[in-house]
Amino acid sequence: MAASSQIPPAPGPWPGQGARVQGYGTVPPGAAAPGAHGGMAMPPYGPGQAPRWGAPVGPPPGWRPPVPPVRKAPSARTPWWQREGVISRVLAVAGVGVTLIGVVMLLVLAAQAGYFGPVLRVGAGAVFSAVLVGAGMRVFGRAGGRVGGIALAATGIAGAYLDVVAVTAIYDWLHPVLGLAVALAVAAGGVALAMEWKSQPLAVLVVAGAAALSPVVTSELMLLGFLIVLQLACAPVQLVRNWPVLHVVRTLPAVLATLGCITIATFDEPAPDRVNWLLAAAIAIAAIGLVTTVLVVRGRPSDVIASLAFAMATTPLLAMPVLFERRAAVVVAAIYAAVLLAVAAAYLSPKLRAVLRVPGHTATVAAIAGAFALLEVCFRVTDGRTAPIALLLVAIGFLGVAGQVRSRVAAAIGGAFAALGAFGLLVVASPNILATQRLAQENLDISTVLAAVLAVAVVAVAVWGIRKLPTMSSGDTEESMLWIVAAAVALYAVTVATVSIGVASGVADGFVIGHCAATILWMVGATAALLYGLRNLSRSAAVAKVALGSGLLVTAAALVKLFLFDLATLDGLVRVAAFLVVGVLLLVVGTRYARAFAEAGATRDRDGEEVR
């Protein structure tokens, strides 16, 4: 038939598939279709020939089945020195260090030995640094020249910085202010080149090399100035680049050098001018650290390294008060505490947080550093007897803030101040002092009364504030422990307050009366807790459990004190009054306790009958 020659070739389902046969489905390659030529396989049809139904369709000419990939056995881990780029980086860093040491030798040791002349030494250092920077820029643009270019440029820029330090500190060719300005320009140029090349290692090598070798060229206040210049020159970089290593490298040298100078000054008798310059350096470091960190975290709230650098920058100014007399130290520490706590408060206030956008980790650093500054104020404005008063006042403030804004950081700081204040009160009014009339009359006065009253207030605010924290919930074991600790501290503080009032009043039996009042107040507090728990027995089982447990513990403590201490110490009508009051309160509580549980039992019986 002529029409059969015009039939286009049928697409063959190769490879791995059979020909599609009408009525029979798919036939594997090489198999004949059922009913076609007696089941015999037909050869492939040639070009231009019409396909025959049932004829197998072969692969195209030249087709080969795919070869499965050969799986290689896992090789051993490549040693670090054989990894690509590791040795080149190590050699580059070593070359930077060795070359910079040579520059320092040229500037310092040659000057000490009288080799060459000042102009030749300084000029040779400047020319050598310029050549290294030029070579680095040339090498950096070539293939595989990034590591070498960074090393050469970093060496040249750091060498130029050391040259400026030598010109200013050794040869006095530049006024210190002008020398610092030139050094700032050199460091800024190096940082600008690092930003253009997008290379954090270049900036780190420049700062680390210059900071590590500057102490060889100069010392003391001039050294602090040049290290602060390095800290300042790198500050703008952090606003546009997330280079965490540079944060630490630019801050740590200035901090360590300033702390070292402060430590040395504490063992000497430094001149007032030297102390003032150290104060200026500490303020500069703290200001650069604070401003830079606040600006950085506004754009990158998750930059924890910026807050770490801020924490390091706060330490020199926190250490400065040791060099001042009391009044000046209080002023410095108080101002610094106010600034730091204001930054922390900006996070707690929603309005200020929207303006400053200070994240939680930065606010935490500011709060802790401010707390240390405030601690210095407390110890500077008080003595050993009045220190608990100041510490407990600060504790009340932090715990109140913690309860108001539900801040765990504020609660932790308040708890630390409360612990220090309680320890101070325990030292001033120890159990031995409270139990001995002679010691009590020698050591207790109105200051211990105020401290004890503040301790009771701290307990109340702490219980109120901590129970509002997200981690606390009514009825938990933590809350029960909180009530137990609070009750113990409150009992001791009440005893200190009453005995101190009795002694400070000047009455002949003031010590005895104070202990009698303490026992009665213990029992009054226990009675109040028990009555409160009984009143809430049907409303809140958790609250009633905590209140009843605390009340019973305080009752037991009051009875132990009554029979073990008061019975042997008190005498006359005072002892009679203590026993009578405690006995009456016990009768009242016992009667109310029995009636409350009887009413609860009657209610359960009535509810059971209604259900039946």
Image (cartoon, helix red, strand yellow):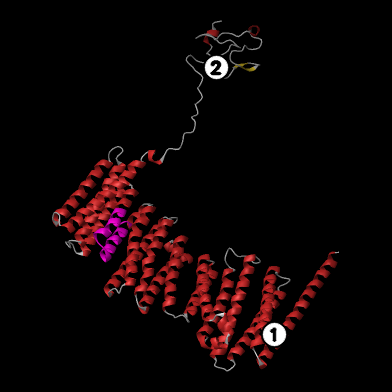
Of residue 314 and residue 118, the one placed in the foreground of this image is 118
Of residues 235 and 214, the one drawn nearer to the viewer in this rendering: 214
Foreground disc of the pair 1, 2: 1
Q: Of label 1 and label 2, which has the lower sequence position? A: 2
Residue at horizontal 28 percent and vertical 75 percent from the top: 272
Badge 1 amino acid: Val
- Seen from the viewer's position, the closer of residues 137 and 262 is 262
Q: Quadrant of residue 340?
A: bottom left
**Residue 413 image point, x, y percent:** 50, 69
In percent of width and height, residue 276 lies at 29, 72
**Residue at image x 49%, y 26%?**
70
Residue 31 x/y as whole percent = 61, 13
Which residue corresponds to mark 1?
582
The range drawn in magenta is 207-234
Label 1, label 2: how far apart the Cα atoms are: 107 Å
Quarter of the figure that contains the C terminus: bottom right
- In the image, residue 429 above or below residue 224: below
